[in-house]
Image (cartoon, rainbow, N blue to C red):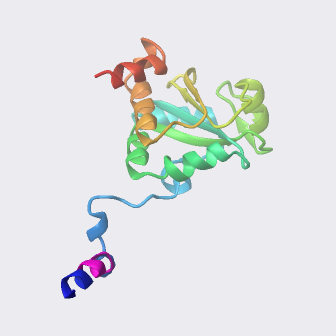
Amino acid sequence: MRASRIISLFPTLLAALLLALPGLGSAGVEDPRDPTHHFFDPTFGDFPEELEEAREAGKKGILLFFEMDDCPFCHRMKNQVLNQPEVQELYKERFRIFAVDVEGAIEVVNFEGETKTMMDFATRDFRVRATPVFQFFNLDGEPITRFTGATRDVDEFLLLGEFVAEGHYEDGNFTRFRRERAGR
């Protein structure tokens, strides 16, 4: 009878032990970090200047995250994917990254040097109708890859970064690239 009492308390004792020894239950796993500070780069919205900084820093290009406040898929990406340290590190190493509010009235300078509101930049220049949209640009300011919607998970978003950074977009689309990688 005494052994069964100890066995029934085991889950409670294990939980108490994990709480008493910080880090034991999450060894090797980093906590999510706010994407506003750890994923996106600060900007004044001058994209020709951002291109120059990307070139000087040896980046592969620029990533624009077209979003809007009431978009549940944008929030999901920020809270489940863009907040992950491995995502932040891979993307920050390869790209300059900026958020663009598709309903925003803040002025930006587009890649051609024209001043527009974020809303006009998103809807007129890039025809963003649904969010989120991840638009990648090469170091000449030319759009090279566009992904609309939320990725399934962190792994798919990491694969998207690899697809662009390693130039696989030149050989085909992301859907085929993802399928070929899954078949390996």
The magenta span reads 7-12
Image location of residue 135, percent across then percent down: 58, 29
- Tell me: residue 104, above or below residue 147: below
The residue shown at (27%, 59%) is: 28
Image location of residue 114, percent across then percent down: 74, 29
Image location of residue 7, percent across then percent down: 24, 78
Image location of residue 145, percent across then percent down: 53, 23
Q: Is residue 152 left or right of residue 58?
A: right
Look at the image and say whether residue 9 sits in the magenta stretch.
yes
- Tell me: residue 160, above or below residue 67: above
- Most common SS among magenta residues: helix
Q: In the depicted view, which residue is nearer to us: 10 or 119?
A: 10
Q: In the depicted view, which residue is nearer to us: 29 or 125?
A: 29
Q: Is residue 17 left or right of residue 135?
A: left
The residue shown at (19%, 83%) is: 3
Quadrant of the drawing holding the N terminus: bottom left
Q: Is residue 56 visible?
A: no
Query: Which residue sits furthest bottom?
Result: 2
Q: How many marks?
A: 0
Query: Which residue sits furthest top?
Result: 171
Look at the image and say whether residue 60 sits in the magenta stretch.
no
Q: In the depicted view, which residue is nearer to us: 32 or 73?
A: 73
